[in-house]
Amino acid sequence: MSLYPLQRLLERIYAVEIGYQVDDFLVTDPQWVAQVDTSPDARLIKEKLLVMQQDDALELSLFLDPEVISCLAEHDPFQSLHDENLQAFLLALEGVSHFLYLGWNAGLDRSVTLLELELQAEVDKYVSALSLIRKQFKGRVPRELRARLFERCIFDGTLQEGQLTRYKDANRYAGKYCWQLENRYLKRKQIAAMWQDLRHFYRLPQGQKLRRIDFS
């Protein structure tokens, strides 16, 4: 299955383009990833963005477990997003989110932190699922979507303390922001205003994102 539709979904939501297709950077061989990723905290996981910077060049590879690709090919989330493909959709979307956000910021000569990447990916998973569900269910959105993504999540037990803190912080901030979106826009059916808010949020640096969430 091509991941480009996921990239285009995010590009349309945020009104951005990077000029590259994620499929050209996709790898599915875990042994290759294990050889390439020699970082001290390397973990064997189903989704991983590999980044290497040499001088002014940024080299990227996105790894997704073959099972994730197979699941999405068998159960196309653009046709129907449901329990059988939701986890695969979220894993793939997270990887595409990292790829797009890093590539877009690199095009502006802006650096990003790991927390910023994870925070944006958490928001992206929610708004992408929301976008597909609204189309598939004639504008209706299940009440449990936000709770399922942010309140019932289980963190990887192999995460080191610093990693776990980063993922929890990203989850907490993204969950609060998405709660704000629901209360400010979804409940009032102000969808166009919500997309405008999201596009503004996407373009903020990390510090402004966190202040935007804390003081809204």
Image: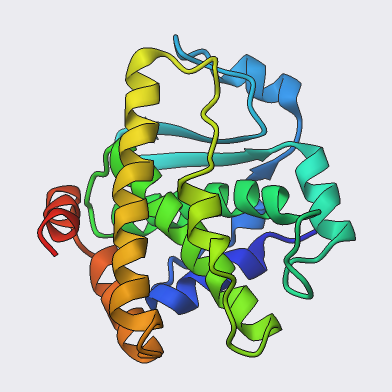
How far across and down, in percent of the image, does residue 140 sit? 59, 83
Q: Determine if residue 25 is in view.
A: no
Task: Quadrant for residue 40, please give it.
Answer: top left
Q: Residue at x 30, y 37 (%)?
A: 169
Q: Is 76 situated above or below 28?
A: below
- Toward the viewer: 206 or 153? 153
Q: Residue at x 30, y 60 (%)?
A: 177
Q: Is 187 situated above or below 11?
A: below
In the picture as drawn, the residue positioned furthest to the top comes out as: 40
- Toward the viewer: 23 or 201? 201
In the picture as drawn, the residue positioned furthest to the front comes out as: 143
Q: Residue at x 11, y 54 (%)?
A: 211
Q: Is 41 situated above or below 206?
A: above
Task: Quadrant for residue 101, please give it.
Answer: bottom left
Q: Residue at x 75, y 62 (%)?
A: 82
Left or right side of 196 for 15: right
Left or right side of 5 for 60: left
